[in-house]
Image: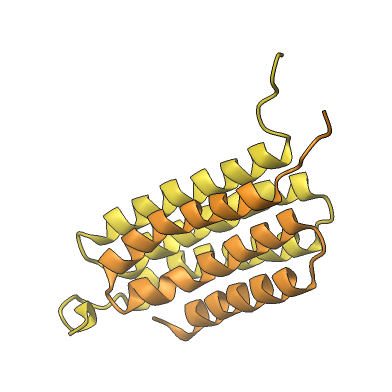
Chain colours: A orange, B yellow
């Protein structure tokens, strides 16, 4: 991987991490977490672990949906 | 042993599309962090996901790379749709 692409992915990871730390709304935190995971993926692919990347790409949305079930809006009856 | 020793390395002029896609991803992430409204963040999340998908597909010239990129594309779109539909309140009972 070139240095410029690596710097861009590091910027994505750091931006997602600090946005997830400093955010208030849980939905904003989930969106920032998704940006962070998107920044992690090119590092996995660059090493050649393509099966790991494909499995992770299918597991991450399931975990996001589990978090969404915990923080969804509950409206009163 | 990792696959990186067995596949040819992308270099030279072929790196320019990857640079463009990485730049689009960083710009989308900047706009996403700067945006205040949650619902307006989601298109920028899609921009970041598509740009990262392009980076994955172009980065390693190997036949399985397109499968990993397609899996990431489907997974990220599914994730942002789940966040959007849950934010919007989900399915209403009785109309």
Residue at horizontal 64%, vertical 79%? A14
Foreground residue among B42 and B31:
B42
Q: Is residue B92 visible?
A: yes
Measured along the vertical axis of the image, is residue A65 above or below residue A32? Answer: above
**Which residue appears farthest toward the front when viewing the image?**
A77
How far across and how far down the image is residue B59, in percent?
Answer: 35, 69
Q: Quadrant of residue A27?
A: bottom right
- Is B73 drawn above or below residue A32 in the view shown? above
In-front residue for pair B47/A44: A44
Please give the count of numbered marks on the rendered protein.
Answer: 0
As rendered, which of A41 and B93 lies closer to the eye?
B93
Percent position (x, y) of residue A61?
49, 53
**Quadrant assignment for the C terminus of chain A:** top right
Q: Position of residue A72 (x, y in %)?
A: 70, 45
**Quadrant assignment for the N terminus of chain A:** bottom left
Q: Residue at x 59, y 47 (%)?
A: B80
Quarter of the image for residue B28 reads bottom right
Percent across and percent down for residue A70 are: 65, 52
Residue B13 in sight from this viewpoint? no
- Looking at the image, residue A58 lies above or below residue A18: above
What residue is at 20 percent from the left and 76 percent from the top?
B8
- Residue B85 is drawn in which quadrant? top right
Above or below for B78 versus B16:
above
Residue found 52% across the figure and 64% down from its top: A38
């Amino acid at each position: 991987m070139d240095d410029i692409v690596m710097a861009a992915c590091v910027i994505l990871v750091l931006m997602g991490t600090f946005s997830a730390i400093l955010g208030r709304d849980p939905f904003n935190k989930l969106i920032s977490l998704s940006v962070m995971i998107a920044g992690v993926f090119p590092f996995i692919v660059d090493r050649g672990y393509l099966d790991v990347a494909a499995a992770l790409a299918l597991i991450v949305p399931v975990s996001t949906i589990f978090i969404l079930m915990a923080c969804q809006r509950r409206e009163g009856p | 042993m990792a696959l990186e020793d067995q596949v040819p390395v992308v270099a030279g002029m072929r790196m320019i599309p990857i640079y463009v896609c990485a730049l689009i991803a960083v710009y989308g992430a900047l706009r996403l962090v700067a945006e205040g409204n949650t619902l307006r963040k989601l298109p920028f999340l899609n921009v970041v996901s598509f740009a990262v998908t392009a980076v994955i597909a172009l980065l390693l010239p190997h036949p399985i790379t397109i499968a990993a990129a397609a899996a990431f594309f489907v997974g990220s779109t599914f994730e942002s749709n789940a966040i959007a539909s849950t934010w919007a309140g989900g399915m209403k009972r009785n109309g």
